[in-house]
Image (spheres, helix red, strand yellow):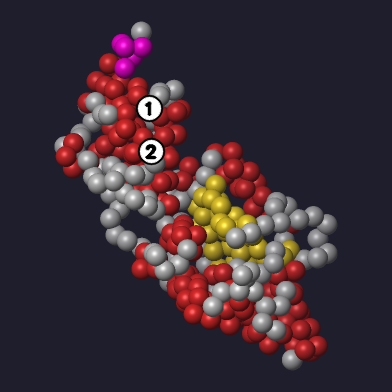
């Protein structure tokens, strides 16, 4: 029975147009990017949802099992044709997802963040990569202003408080990188919703003058097209979700959404259906619990005047 099933899968896959094998047999990648690994992970999910082992899928496609493993770990690239062949063999009928993955498979242009590879830690690059491919961004911060909305002085002060303390050169490099990340908001094509806890409005990095300038910049940003800033006040009787700083990036399809969490000395990414569902709920609850845009702007202005009156 199993052999008959595998033969049927192989026949079905053969109906899809295929790129010649020599074009798919790409050199092994030493360090696949986050997006390349995500493509492979989605292919693995397809296979697992079909109830196929790696060897079974390899047999159905006429491949070596090692090739399947390499594709699923992002170690080798795949063509759009082969991606569709894998989808057919796995009986994946989610057309929007398959087409979105096919587009990922043919991506060749390098993102601007690749200029920093080998210079900055990979975490920095992967955060920019997620943002660069997002269709919509949500952030939730509790200890500092979101990176995409920070002033240069505030960002430098945030980096300077790291342990062990980085060199002045490293602080300048990280700050330049953060400022460049902010360009994704310049053309107003990427919708961005920032949830900021009142604690982050009051936390000082670099002193009161830097904070006042940061809050003034935040007020200005809150009026920009495509940017929505919502504050969670101390007076709120609940705080949905994690106390960690979060980013939720919408992908081309819901299955390709990504959650990023900042933890001590690292950045973590989540993309399992269970995690995505959980954090969608978190952000929905945040939207219901936070102040309106107008109320948020007034609270930010109030905190700014308070800090200015006391310290500046």
State which quarter of the image contains the N terminus.
Answer: top left
Q: Residue furthest bottom?
A: 312
> Is residue 179 visible to the viewer in this orientation of the structure?
no
Instruction: Give the camera-side residue of 171 and 213.
Output: 171
Horizontally, residue 242 falls left or right of residue 94, namely: right
Q: Position of residue 173 (x, y in %)?
A: 47, 76
Q: Circle 2 sits in a helix, a strand or a loop, which is it?
A: helix
Q: Position of residue 182 (x, y in %)?
A: 49, 72
Q: Circle 1 sits in a helix, a strand or a loop, which is it?
A: helix
The verdict on residue 194 being magenta is: no
Image position of 289 with respect to 274: above or below: below
Q: Position of residue 129 (x, y in %)?
A: 43, 59
Q: Are marks 2 and 1 in contact (CB under 8 Å)?
A: yes
The boundaries of the magenta stretch are: 2-6
| Residue displayed at 23% across by 45% down | 26
| Residue displayed at 30% across by 38% down | 83
Image position of 84 with respect to 305: above or below: above
Instruction: Give the camera-side residue of 121 and 270.
Output: 121
Main structural element of the magenta stretch: helix, strand or loop? Answer: helix
| Residue displayed at 30% across by 34% down | 67
Horizontally, residue 300 falls left or right of residue 68, namely: right
Horizontally, residue 201 falls left or right of residue 252, namely: right
| Residue displayed at 26% across by 43% down | 79
Disc assigned to residue 54: 1
Can you tell which quarter of the image residue 165 is in? bottom right
Disc assigned to residue 72: 2
State which quarter of the image contains the C terminus.
Answer: bottom right
Q: Position of residue 218 (x, y in %)?
A: 62, 76
Image position of 5 with respect to 30: above or below: above
N-terminal of the two: label 2 or label 1? 1
């Amino acid at each position: 029975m199993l052999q008959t099933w595998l033969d049927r899968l192989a026949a079905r896959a053969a109906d899809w147009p295929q790129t010649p094998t020599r074009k798919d047999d790409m050199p092994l990648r030493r360090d696949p990017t986050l997006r390349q690994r995500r493509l492979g992970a989605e292919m693995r999910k397809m296979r697992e949802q079909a109830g196929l082992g790696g060897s079974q899928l390899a047999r159905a496609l006429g491949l070596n099992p090692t090739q399947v493993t390499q594709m699923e770990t992002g170690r080798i690239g795949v063509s759009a044709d082969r991606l569709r062949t894998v989808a057919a063999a796995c009986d994946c009928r989610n057309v929007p997802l398959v087409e979105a993955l096919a587009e990922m498979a043919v991506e060749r242009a390098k993102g601007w963040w690749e200029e920093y590879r080998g210079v900055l830690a990979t975490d920095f690059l992967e955060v920019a990569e997620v943002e660069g491919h997002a269709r919509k961004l949500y952030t939730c911060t509790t200890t500092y202003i979101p990176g995409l909305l920070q002033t240069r002085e505030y960002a430098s002060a945030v980096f300077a408080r790291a342990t062990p303390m980085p060199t002045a050169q490293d602080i300048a490099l990280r700050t330049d990188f953060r400022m460049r990340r902010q360009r994704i908001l310049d053309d107003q094509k990427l919708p961005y919703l920032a949830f900021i806890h009142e604690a982050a409005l009051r936390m000082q990095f670099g002193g009161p003058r830097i904070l006042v300038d940061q809050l003034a910049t935040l007020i200005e940003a809150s009026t920009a097209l495509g940017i929505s800033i919502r504050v969670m006040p101390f007076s709120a009787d609940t705080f949905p979700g994690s106390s960690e700083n979060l980013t939720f990036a919408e992908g081309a399809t819901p299955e390709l959404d990504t959650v990023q969490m900042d933890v001590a000395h690292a950045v973590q990414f989540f993309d399992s259906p269970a995690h995505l569902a959980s954090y969608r709920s978190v952000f929905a609850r945040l939207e219901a619990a936070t102040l309106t845009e107008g109320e948020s702007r007034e609270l930010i202005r109030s905190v700014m005047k308070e800090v200015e009156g006391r310290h500046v």
